[in-house]
Image (cartoon, rainbow, N blue to C red):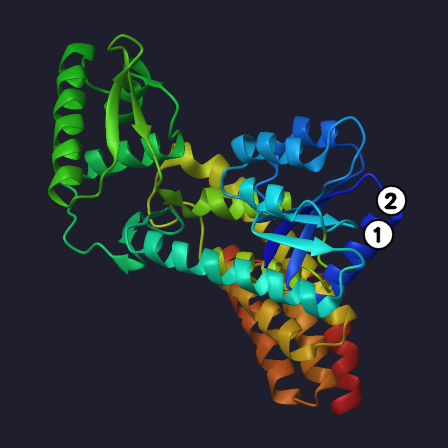
Amino acid sequence: MLRVVLIDDEKLALIQLESTLRALGTTIVTATYTNPLQALDEASGWNADIIFLDIDMPVLNGLEAAAALEARCPGSAIVFVTAYNNFALEAFEASAQDYLLKPVSRERLRKTIQRIRNRKGKIQSADKQDELMIRGFNSIQFERGGLPIRDFRWRTSKSQELFAYLLYYHDRIVVKDKLVELLWPDTSFKRASTHLYTAIYQLRQSLKRSDIGLTISNASVGEGYMLESGDAKIDFVLWEEGILSLEPVDDHNAPVHEELFKLYTGDFLGDYDYLWAESERQRLRNLSLQHATELADYYSAKDNITKAVNTYQRIVELHPYHEPGYLALMDFYNRLGELSFVQEQYDKLRSLLWRDLKLKPSAKVERWYANWKRLYT
């Protein structure tokens, strides 16, 4: 779904346009403004796909605002919305993607959005052929244009951990002393510094050999290193930014929440036993569980049992000791009349807790199960 921002000094016009956009169901209205100066102050944080902009406004008219917005939001399409048809030439000279006359009909708005979507799709399709994705959920993997880069090899486990640490702190300086202490804690500083220099060299050569295009630069007058991410995408960064930027799940943004839910494929660096990553792993894990539960609860409230069950199944896969997930599945399967599946979820939870933690299910789960057994035995 496209992210849009609306700017119009008339409050009623904003309400009408937002209502029409919501009815179309193809966009997310992330911000509305009646004051163009305030909009310019906050524009750098929008990340909007489309900016709908009135032309006839006091203090700063739409044409002037568009010039400033083009500099602040170079990736955003600007669409003018006005009650007057005598600004069309100036609008297109200002690089506007479209020019709409009030009142804007739903069909006219739909065509505008589809045209911009198609244009963005062509640009993104060309860009994605060269787009580098770095994945850090579960294990570190590199993809180019959506395809795995299979010829990359880590020279040593230390160089792999070194990259993981620099990736976590991407675009920030990590001092050499910290890396030496982290990777070679039982080695003399002089020898560990040599190991670090060798690992950095090997890592740079591996990245270059596979044409990954990442730079590890010397920083802070040679006292540290920095992984420069450039245009590369990092999955755990995209995932968290997406979740934090969205409003709570509703009918309008549920598909976006669903895509973010799918993006979380496992724990941060979950395949590696890096103690330094544990706190971040747990933080993202908790955020994942909170987000997934909100999505599952939304589907439950909408009585979309299929999606609710699918979401809870994924929750217990990612968080195998999460009792509320099993209890929710037991309840849904009971409502569906799938009694064998109810028993299967209970047995799975009980076995897992005892095998791994030497614990029994909580009193709440046991009460629910006991009541269920009385009804069906």
Q: Please give the name of the residue rendered at 19% of the width and 18% of the height, measured from the top-left corner.
A: 187
Report crowding for label 1: few under 14, some 14 to 19, many 20 or more residues within 10 A (C-alpha).
some
Three-letter amino acid code at disc 1?
Answer: Ile
**Residue found farthest to the top:** 221
Instruction: Give whichever of 345, 95 is nearer the camera.
Output: 95
User: Toward which corner of the image does residue 338 lie, by quadrant?
Assistant: bottom right
Instruction: Give whichever of 38, 326 is nearer the camera.
Output: 38
**Residue found farthest to the right:** 12
Instruction: Check disc 2 and report the residue beneath it.
Output: 11
Q: Is residue 93 above or below residue 290?
A: above
Q: Is residue 330 left or right of residue 222?
A: right
SS type, badge 2? helix
Instruction: Give whichever of 313, 39 is nearer the camera.
Output: 39
Does the image show residue 156? no
User: Toward which corner of the image does residue 157 lie, by quadrant?
Assistant: top left
SS type, badge 1? helix
Q: Are marks 2 and 1 in contact (CB under 8 Å)?
A: yes
Report crowding for label 2: few under 14, some 14 to 19, many 20 or more residues within 10 A (C-alpha).
few
Q: Is residue 164 left or right of residue 329?
A: left
User: Toward which corner of the image does residue 55 lie, by quadrant?
Assistant: top right
Residue 361 screen position, x and y as percent: 65, 64
Q: Is residue 274 left or right of residue 354?
A: left
Three-letter amino acid code at disc 2?
Answer: Lys
Residue 177 screen position, x and y as percent: 29, 14
Residue 93 screen position, x and y as percent: 54, 41
Q: Please give the name of the residue rendered at 61% of the width and 39% of the height, measured from the top-left corner.
A: 46
Disc 2 to disc 1, C-alpha distance: 6 Å
Image quadrant occupied by the C terminus: bottom right
Residue 301 screen position, x and y as percent: 78, 69
Image quadrant occupied by the N terminus: bottom right
Instruction: Give whichever of 165, 355 is nearer the camera.
Output: 165
Instruction: Check disc 1 and report the residue beneath it.
Output: 15
